[in-house]
Image (cartoon, rainbow, N blue to C red):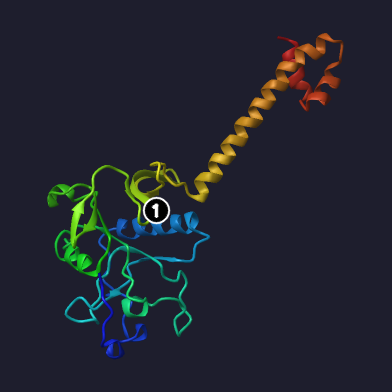
């Protein structure tokens, strides 16, 4: 766990520190995966103000050789901090500077492994352990055989050492979320991605998915109602009502009534 630095007065402010190292990502997953988690969390935790998730932002800390050298995960989640923290320039956080965050480290960090090995399984694991990051998630869908690891590994910090968790999704009680893989479909394109799960192992749906489900349920309800009205046509015709009367009563077209009349 990070301890407060007695020399904080000599530490640089966030205005003096770069927000990242401007290193380009190797593949689109390094941006897509953490941004998808961020956008979904904005929906799931939309009414909470005590968390912060960012993508490719530098985390400045005092556990390394130089507090001006950040560690930059592909994504990270902190809890117990301001969700929207205004900088002196009014642009929100420029970087995540622990001595400006009451020394609260991220509770979760995410690394998406690329073709260029980024020390995800050794150096970064050691850095995050020193920081006190409780959960370390390594997503390696393309190069896991090369690296002799699993496509998704979630580690929990226990007594200063990371222990690989089993099962999927992995429930993280301290965070109140689970994390695991799923098949993401958008614009007719399907691909594997990471997402959040609840305590029961059910996947949290995005707003768009909820709207699609609602529209489908409404379509099915309307179809069931229409089917019931069509079934009532014969009974009403047998009672001596005319086709126009039945059509008006059941909100059907004359053609629909006549088609049932001829059956």
In screen coordinates, is 247 left or right of 178?
right
Q: Nearer the viewer, residue 258 or 92?
A: 92
Percent position of residue 38, x then y: 41, 59
Q: Is residue 117 above or below residue 19?
A: above
| On-image quarter of the C terminus | top right
Q: In this orientation, which residue lies closer to the viewer: 175 or 67?
A: 175
- Residue at the spot of label 1: 176
Task: Indicate whether 34 appears above or below 259.
Answer: below
Numbered label tally: 1
Q: Residue furthest front?
A: 159
Residue 165 seen in this snapshot: yes
The answer to whether residue 118 is left or right of residue 75 is: left
**Where 234 sits versus 181, above or below?**
above
Q: Position of residue 87 (x, y in %)?
A: 44, 81
Quadrant (top left/top right/bottom left/bottom right) for the N terminus: bottom left
Residue 225 occupies which quadrant of the picture? top right
User: Element under label 1?
Assistant: loop
Q: Is residue 107 above or below residue 179?
A: below
The residue that appears at 48% across and 54% down in the rendered structure is 44
Picture quadrant of residue 66: bottom left
**In x, y percent, where is residue 45?**
48, 57
Residue 86 rendering spot, x and y as whole percentages: 47, 78
Q: Can residue 113 be seen here?
A: no
Q: Residues within 10 Å of mark 1 (few under 14, many from 20)?
A: few
């Amino acid at each position: 766990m990070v301890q407060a630095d007695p020399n904080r007065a000599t530490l640089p402010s966030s205005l003096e520190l770069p927000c990242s190292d401007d290193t380009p990502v190797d593949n689109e997953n390094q941006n897509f995966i953490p941004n998808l988690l961020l956008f979904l969390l904005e929906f799931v935790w939309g009414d909470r103000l005590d968390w912060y998730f960012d993508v490719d932002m530098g985390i400045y800390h005092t556990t390394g050789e130089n507090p001006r050298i950040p560690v930059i995960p592909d994504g990270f989640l902190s809890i117990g901090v301001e969700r929207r923290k205004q900088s002196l320039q009014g642009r929100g956080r420029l970087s995540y500077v622990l001595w400006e965050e009451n020394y609260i480290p991220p509770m979760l960090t995410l690394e998406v492994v690329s073709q260029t090995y980024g020390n995800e399984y050794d150096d970064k694991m050691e850095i995050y352990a020193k920081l006190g990051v409780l959960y370390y998630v390594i997503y390696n869908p393309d190069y896991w055989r090369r690296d002799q690891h699993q496509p998704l590994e979630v580690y929990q910090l226990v007594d200063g050492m990371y222990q690989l968790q089993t099962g999927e999704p992995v429930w993280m009680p301290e965070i109140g979320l689970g994390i695991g893989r799923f098949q993401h479909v958008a614009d007719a394109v399907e691909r594997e991605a990471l997402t959040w799960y609840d305590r029961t192992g059910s996947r949290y749906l995005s707003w768009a998915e909820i709207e699609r489900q609602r529209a489908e349920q409404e379509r099915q309800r309307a179809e069931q109602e229409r089917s019931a009205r069509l079934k009532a046509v014969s009974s009403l015709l047998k009672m001596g009502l005319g086709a126009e009367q039945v059509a008006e009563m059941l909100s059907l077209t004359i053609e629909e009534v006549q088609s049932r009349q001829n059956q």
